[in-house]
Amino acid sequence: MARYFGSKCRLCRREAAKLFLKGEKCFSDKCAIERRNYGPGLHGQRRRKVSDYGVHLREKQKIKRTYCLLEKQFRNYFEKASRMSGVTGENLLVLLERRLDNVVYRLGFSASRSEARQVVSHKQILVNGNCVNIASYLVKPGDRIAVDETCRNHLRIKGAMESAMRRSFPSWLEVDPVSLSGTFVSFPDRADLPADYNENLIVELYSK
């Protein structure tokens, strides 16, 4: 499976936004955005005039990189969202939030989405009591997601949950920190998703 192996902090600096790709580091003063709030590379501090296309592209790249997807995967989600009833942009965000690796991250079972993908692929996650090792598996309302009993004492998982408990959990999830399990209650509303996402720019970009 194709993956990005470069610097994650470089992606945040390129998008000039926190993508939360490095777990707890993103919430500390060691975050790259806090220390070097300009683009990466030799000419990162130059002021660039961004075209209309560039504005659309940067928004797509920001959301695509936040969910740790490559272009083909992201485009497939967009095409699926466009075939669904409702608003295409909102459908796209809901599909991304339904990915199992994202739900595992939101539940606090991992410190980042890339770590969540690893946890899922290593068969440490159960969905309705069955082992699922496909990160792109789409979770449905009512599904119960839990850490496998043999993995509940792993320090990385326990540490991630402790960090998540210091913050708030999404309203569309029910979390039991003691048993390291949770329920996907409902699809998230647009108001529950990050306000700095402008999904309409992505729709316009792919519609050109």
Image: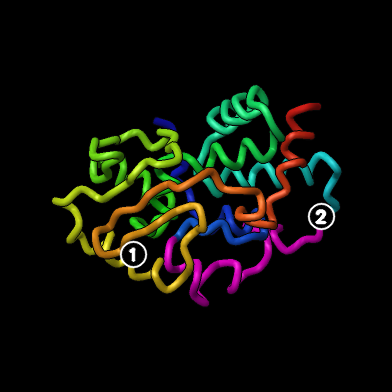
**Disc number at residue 161?**
1
Residue drawn at the location 38% of the way across and 49% of the way down: 183
Question: Label 2 sits on what residue type?
Answer: Arg
Residue 7 spot, x, y in % from top left: 49, 53
Quarter holding residue 94: top right
Residue drawn at the location 50% of the way across and 71% of the way down: 27
Residue 205 spot, x, y in % from top left: 76, 34
In magenta segment, residue 118:
no
| Residue in the foreground of this view, choosing between 178 and 103 | 178
Residue located farthest toward the top when viewing the structure as drawn: 83
Residue 104 spot, x, y in % from top left: 38, 50
| Residue in the foreground of this view, choosing between 38 and 147 | 147
In magenta segment, residue 45:
yes
Cα gap from disc 1 to disc 2, whole angstroms: 40 Å
Q: Quadrant of the N terminus?
A: top left
Question: Label 1 sits on what residue type?
Answer: Met
Residue drawn at the location 55% of the way across and 37% of the way down: 95
In the rendered structure, the answer to whether residue 3 lies left or right of residue 133 reads right
**Disc 2: CA contacts within 10 A as few (<14), some (14-19) or many (>=20):** few
Image height of 170 relative to 136, above or below:
below
Q: What stretch is highlighted in magenta?
A: 23-47
**Disc number at residue 48?**
2
In the rendered structure, the answer to whether residue 49 lies left or right of residue 87 reads right
Q: Do the residues labelled 1 and 2 touch (CB within 8 Å)?
A: no
Asked which secondary structure carries label 1, the reply is: helix
Q: Main secondary structure of the magenta part?
A: loop
**Disc 1: CA contacts within 10 A as few (<14), some (14-19) or many (>=20):** many
Image height of 72 relative to 167, above or below:
above
Residue 134 spot, x, y in % from top left: 35, 33
